Image (tube, rainbow, N blue to C red):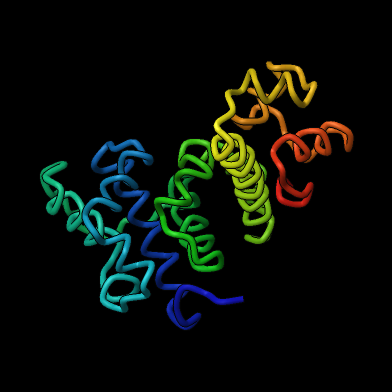
Amino acid sequence: MTYSYNQVYLNDAMNNMAEAFEIAAHIYKLNLDYFLQIFIISGIASQFEKGNPKYIAGKSGAELVADAVTLTNASEVKMPETSFINISEEYWTGWVTAYYQWISGKTFKEIQQIISMSELKNKYNPYHEMDEMQIVDYIQSKADKTNAVNRLQMYRKKLGLSQSELATEADVNLRTLQQYEIGAKDIHKASVSTIASLAKVLKCDIKNLL
Protein backbone atom coordinates (compact mmCIF):
# COMPACT_ATOMS: atom_id res chain seq x y z
CA MET A 1 0.00 0.00 0.00
CA THR A 2 1.27 3.48 -0.88
CA TYR A 3 0.73 6.03 1.87
CA SER A 4 0.49 9.79 1.41
CA TYR A 5 3.73 10.50 3.28
CA ASN A 6 6.30 8.93 5.59
CA GLN A 7 4.74 7.35 8.65
CA VAL A 8 7.16 9.21 10.91
CA TYR A 9 4.98 12.31 10.43
CA LEU A 10 1.64 10.56 10.91
CA ASN A 11 1.16 11.06 14.63
CA ASP A 12 1.91 14.79 14.37
CA ALA A 13 -0.42 15.12 11.39
CA MET A 14 -3.26 13.36 13.21
CA ASN A 15 -2.79 15.37 16.39
CA ASN A 16 -2.65 18.67 14.51
CA MET A 17 -5.69 17.90 12.37
CA ALA A 18 -7.58 16.79 15.47
CA GLU A 19 -6.70 20.01 17.29
CA ALA A 20 -7.64 22.04 14.20
CA PHE A 21 -11.11 20.46 14.07
CA GLU A 22 -11.56 21.00 17.80
CA ILE A 23 -10.56 24.67 17.60
CA ALA A 24 -12.59 25.31 14.44
CA ALA A 25 -15.70 23.96 16.15
CA HIS A 26 -15.31 25.35 19.67
CA ILE A 27 -13.31 28.56 19.25
CA TYR A 28 -14.41 29.69 15.78
CA LYS A 29 -17.87 28.07 16.02
CA LEU A 30 -17.53 26.64 12.51
CA ASN A 31 -19.42 23.66 11.16
CA LEU A 32 -16.88 20.90 10.46
CA ASP A 33 -17.91 20.48 6.82
CA TYR A 34 -17.56 24.22 6.32
CA PHE A 35 -14.17 24.20 7.96
CA LEU A 36 -12.96 21.34 5.77
CA GLN A 37 -14.10 23.34 2.73
CA ILE A 38 -12.05 26.30 3.96
CA PHE A 39 -9.11 23.98 4.58
CA ILE A 40 -9.36 22.70 0.99
CA ILE A 41 -9.89 26.11 -0.66
CA SER A 42 -7.00 27.65 1.25
CA GLY A 43 -4.59 25.18 -0.35
CA ILE A 44 -3.42 23.87 3.02
CA ALA A 45 -5.19 20.56 2.40
CA SER A 46 -3.04 19.93 -0.66
CA GLN A 47 0.08 20.55 1.43
CA PHE A 48 -1.15 17.95 3.91
CA GLU A 49 -1.81 15.50 1.09
CA LYS A 50 1.74 15.98 -0.21
CA GLY A 51 3.15 15.45 3.27
CA ASN A 52 4.73 18.89 3.49
CA PRO A 53 6.45 18.80 6.93
CA LYS A 54 5.82 22.53 7.39
CA TYR A 55 2.08 21.83 7.61
CA ILE A 56 1.70 18.28 8.89
CA ALA A 57 4.25 18.65 11.68
CA GLY A 58 5.51 22.23 11.78
CA LYS A 59 2.23 23.97 12.58
CA SER A 60 -0.13 23.43 15.48
CA GLY A 61 -3.83 22.88 14.95
CA ALA A 62 -4.48 26.46 16.03
CA GLU A 63 -2.02 27.75 13.43
CA LEU A 64 -3.58 25.59 10.71
CA VAL A 65 -7.02 27.04 11.42
CA ALA A 66 -5.63 30.57 11.59
CA ASP A 67 -3.90 30.16 8.23
CA ALA A 68 -7.00 28.63 6.63
CA VAL A 69 -9.40 31.37 7.77
CA THR A 70 -6.89 34.09 6.86
CA LEU A 71 -6.29 32.76 3.35
CA THR A 72 -10.03 32.44 2.68
CA ASN A 73 -11.22 35.51 4.60
CA ALA A 74 -13.61 33.20 6.43
CA SER A 75 -13.12 34.66 9.89
CA GLU A 76 -10.94 36.78 12.11
CA VAL A 77 -8.07 34.89 13.70
CA LYS A 78 -8.87 33.68 17.22
CA MET A 79 -5.71 32.10 18.59
CA PRO A 80 -6.24 30.30 21.93
CA GLU A 81 -4.00 31.62 24.70
CA THR A 82 -2.96 28.11 25.74
CA SER A 83 -2.75 24.68 24.12
CA PHE A 84 -6.28 23.64 23.28
CA ILE A 85 -6.69 19.89 23.35
CA ASN A 86 -10.00 18.37 24.33
CA ILE A 87 -10.72 14.79 23.26
CA SER A 88 -14.17 15.55 21.92
CA GLU A 89 -16.21 14.26 18.98
CA GLU A 90 -14.69 17.01 16.85
CA TYR A 91 -11.15 16.13 17.93
CA TRP A 92 -11.75 12.46 17.07
CA THR A 93 -13.24 13.43 13.69
CA GLY A 94 -10.11 15.36 12.75
CA TRP A 95 -7.92 12.53 14.03
CA VAL A 96 -9.54 9.82 11.91
CA THR A 97 -9.90 12.11 8.87
CA ALA A 98 -6.14 12.65 8.87
CA TYR A 99 -5.54 8.92 9.36
CA TYR A 100 -7.89 7.91 6.54
CA GLN A 101 -6.33 10.47 4.21
CA TRP A 102 -2.87 9.08 4.96
CA ILE A 103 -3.76 5.42 4.61
CA SER A 104 -6.01 5.82 1.55
CA GLY A 105 -4.03 8.43 -0.38
CA LYS A 106 -7.30 10.19 -1.25
CA THR A 107 -7.60 13.95 -1.27
CA PHE A 108 -9.63 15.68 1.43
CA LYS A 109 -12.09 16.72 -1.28
CA GLU A 110 -12.57 13.09 -2.28
CA ILE A 111 -13.02 12.11 1.35
CA GLN A 112 -15.70 14.75 1.88
CA GLN A 113 -17.55 13.40 -1.16
CA ILE A 114 -17.49 9.92 0.38
CA ILE A 115 -18.52 10.90 3.90
CA SER A 116 -19.47 14.27 5.35
CA MET A 117 -17.72 15.40 8.49
CA SER A 118 -21.12 15.58 10.19
CA GLU A 119 -21.77 11.91 9.46
CA LEU A 120 -18.27 10.97 10.54
CA LYS A 121 -18.65 12.87 13.81
CA ASN A 122 -21.87 10.96 14.46
CA LYS A 123 -19.84 7.73 14.30
CA TYR A 124 -17.88 8.80 17.40
CA ASN A 125 -19.94 6.30 19.34
CA PRO A 126 -18.99 3.48 19.27
CA TYR A 127 -16.01 3.84 16.90
CA HIS A 128 -13.86 6.01 19.19
CA GLU A 129 -13.42 2.98 21.44
CA MET A 130 -12.21 0.82 18.55
CA ASP A 131 -8.99 0.55 16.57
CA GLU A 132 -8.74 3.20 13.81
CA MET A 133 -8.97 0.48 11.14
CA GLN A 134 -12.60 -0.12 12.09
CA ILE A 135 -13.65 3.37 11.02
CA VAL A 136 -11.30 3.14 8.02
CA ASP A 137 -13.16 0.00 6.92
CA TYR A 138 -16.50 1.80 7.36
CA ILE A 139 -15.40 4.78 5.26
CA GLN A 140 -13.87 2.48 2.65
CA SER A 141 -17.14 0.55 2.35
CA LYS A 142 -18.86 3.86 1.57
CA ALA A 143 -16.14 4.67 -0.96
CA ASP A 144 -16.64 1.32 -2.69
CA LYS A 145 -20.40 1.90 -2.78
CA THR A 146 -19.87 5.37 -4.26
CA ASN A 147 -17.59 3.93 -6.94
CA ALA A 148 -20.21 1.36 -7.90
CA VAL A 149 -22.87 4.07 -8.17
CA ASN A 150 -20.58 6.19 -10.33
CA ARG A 151 -19.86 3.24 -12.63
CA LEU A 152 -23.56 2.52 -13.13
CA GLN A 153 -24.21 6.14 -14.05
CA MET A 154 -21.11 6.28 -16.24
CA TYR A 155 -22.09 3.27 -18.35
CA ARG A 156 -25.70 4.44 -18.66
CA LYS A 157 -24.74 7.94 -19.75
CA LYS A 158 -22.07 6.59 -22.10
CA LEU A 159 -24.83 4.80 -24.04
CA GLY A 160 -27.10 7.84 -23.90
CA LEU A 161 -29.79 6.03 -21.96
CA SER A 162 -32.17 7.69 -19.55
CA GLN A 163 -32.92 5.98 -16.25
CA SER A 164 -36.35 5.08 -17.58
CA GLU A 165 -34.94 3.55 -20.77
CA LEU A 166 -32.38 1.49 -18.86
CA ALA A 167 -35.00 0.29 -16.39
CA THR A 168 -37.29 -0.78 -19.22
CA GLU A 169 -34.61 -2.55 -21.28
CA ALA A 170 -33.11 -4.30 -18.25
CA ASP A 171 -36.55 -5.11 -16.79
CA VAL A 172 -35.62 -3.42 -13.52
CA ASN A 173 -38.01 -1.34 -11.44
CA LEU A 174 -37.34 2.34 -12.21
CA ARG A 175 -37.48 3.39 -8.55
CA THR A 176 -35.02 0.65 -7.65
CA LEU A 177 -32.63 1.77 -10.41
CA GLN A 178 -32.85 5.36 -9.19
CA GLN A 179 -32.03 4.21 -5.66
CA TYR A 180 -28.99 2.34 -6.95
CA GLU A 181 -27.80 5.47 -8.75
CA ILE A 182 -28.05 7.74 -5.71
CA GLY A 183 -26.71 5.10 -3.36
CA ALA A 184 -29.93 4.76 -1.37
CA LYS A 185 -29.77 1.03 -2.15
CA ASP A 186 -26.57 -0.98 -2.29
CA ILE A 187 -26.12 -2.39 -5.78
CA HIS A 188 -23.81 -5.02 -4.32
CA LYS A 189 -26.88 -6.54 -2.67
CA ALA A 190 -28.87 -6.73 -5.91
CA SER A 191 -29.76 -10.18 -7.24
CA VAL A 192 -27.41 -11.83 -9.72
CA SER A 193 -30.15 -11.70 -12.38
CA THR A 194 -30.60 -7.93 -11.87
CA ILE A 195 -26.88 -7.22 -12.16
CA ALA A 196 -26.59 -9.53 -15.19
CA SER A 197 -29.51 -7.81 -16.89
CA LEU A 198 -28.08 -4.34 -16.27
CA ALA A 199 -24.65 -5.41 -17.48
CA LYS A 200 -26.14 -6.88 -20.67
CA VAL A 201 -27.97 -3.66 -21.55
CA LEU A 202 -24.98 -1.53 -20.60
CA LYS A 203 -22.66 -3.74 -22.69
CA CYS A 204 -20.23 -4.35 -19.85
CA ASP A 205 -19.12 -7.20 -17.63
CA ILE A 206 -20.86 -7.82 -14.34
CA LYS A 207 -17.58 -7.16 -12.53
CA ASN A 208 -17.52 -3.66 -14.01
CA LEU A 209 -20.65 -2.75 -12.05
CA LEU A 210 -19.37 -4.24 -8.82
- Residue depicted at x 37% and y 75%: 51
- Residue depicted at x 36% and y 64%: 16
Please state the horizontal and vertical placement of residue 127, each as a whole percent of the image. 65, 48
Q: Nearer the viewer, residue 176 or 51?
A: 176
Please give left or right for residue 111 compared with residue 203 in the image.
Answer: left
- Residue depicted at x 81% and y 33%: 197
Relative to 194, residue 60 above or below: below
Q: Nearer the viewer, residue 91 or 151?
A: 151
Q: Nearer the viewer, residue 74 or 26?
A: 74
Please state the horizontal and vertical placement of residue 178, each as a whole percent of the image. 63, 23
Please state the horizontal and vertical placement of residue 146, each as a whole percent of the image. 60, 43
Q: How many marks?
A: 0
Please give left or right for residue 121 compared with residue 44 in the image.
Answer: right
Please state the horizontal and vertical placement of residue 76, each as a whole percent of the image. 10, 44
Relative to 41, residue 25 above or below: above
- Residue depicted at x 34% and y 47%: 36
Q: Nearer the viewer, residue 105 or 9?
A: 105
Please give left or right for residue 168 compared with residue 19 in the image.
Answer: right
**In which quarter of the view is residue 184 placed?**
top right
| Quarter occupied by the N terminus | bottom right
